[in-house]
Amino acid sequence: MYVVEPHENINSLTTAMYICTVTVTTVGYGDVTPTTNSGRVLAGVLCFISVLFMAMPISVLGNAMTHAWADRSRILLMTRTRQRLKNYGYEASDMPSLFRKFDSNGNGELTMDEFCDMIGKMNVGIRPSEAEELFELFDTDASGGIDDKEFMKALFPDDYRRIYMRTTTATMTFT
């Protein structure tokens, strides 16, 4: 700006820096404006570059916020479910037998209908829509079924290690 504008309009380097800063931040006070075509083109290029410069960080931030919000919903649902199960007297060690009881075809996995039926009959205050959302959270491989291990690993990770890792270790020791 200092080079392309007449010195009557922009009389110092600090004034040129000021107009560039005001232009880049799109504040545009209007107290100092370019008077030549070169100055106007330069101001336009500065505006365009500033939009490109800000678009990337804003989109990255927006994407991060979207993921954080989705994780927040998932974490809150998992926490509420874990608390409701405990409040109604269910423990992590009850889950494998409950899964076997509601597995109508005996394949070791519950379908969404079987899972929602199990949650409903447990009377733990989980709405059907929440049960469906839980099922989708646990069905990480999108197979359409979840087994007790997937459920335990997601909802009770400490108990999962205690219950299933001990079984695996004991099996490995004796084979």
Image (cartoon, rainbow, N blue to C red):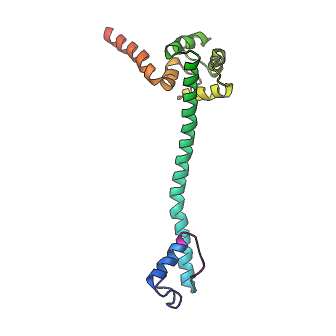
Segment colored magenta: 23-31
The residue drawn where x is 45% and y is 19% is 159
Q: Is residue 170 visible?
A: yes
Residue 175 in view of the camera: no
Furthest-bottom residue in view?
8
Residue at left offset 45%, top offset 80%: 14
For image coordinates 51% across by 22% down, the residue present is: 150
- Residue 125: image location, x then y, percent: 65, 22
Q: Is residue 59 above or below residue 101?
A: below
Quadrant containing the C terminus is top left
In x, y percent, where is residue 47? 55, 71
- Secondary structure that dominates the magenta span: loop
Which picture quadrant has residue 28? Answer: bottom right
Furthest-front residue in this view: 87
Of residue 109 and residue 24, the one placed in the foreground of this image is 24
Residue in front for this viewpoint, 64 or 83: 83
Residue 109: give x, y in percent of width and height: 56, 17
Q: In the rendered view, tell whether residue 84 sits above or below residue 39.
A: above
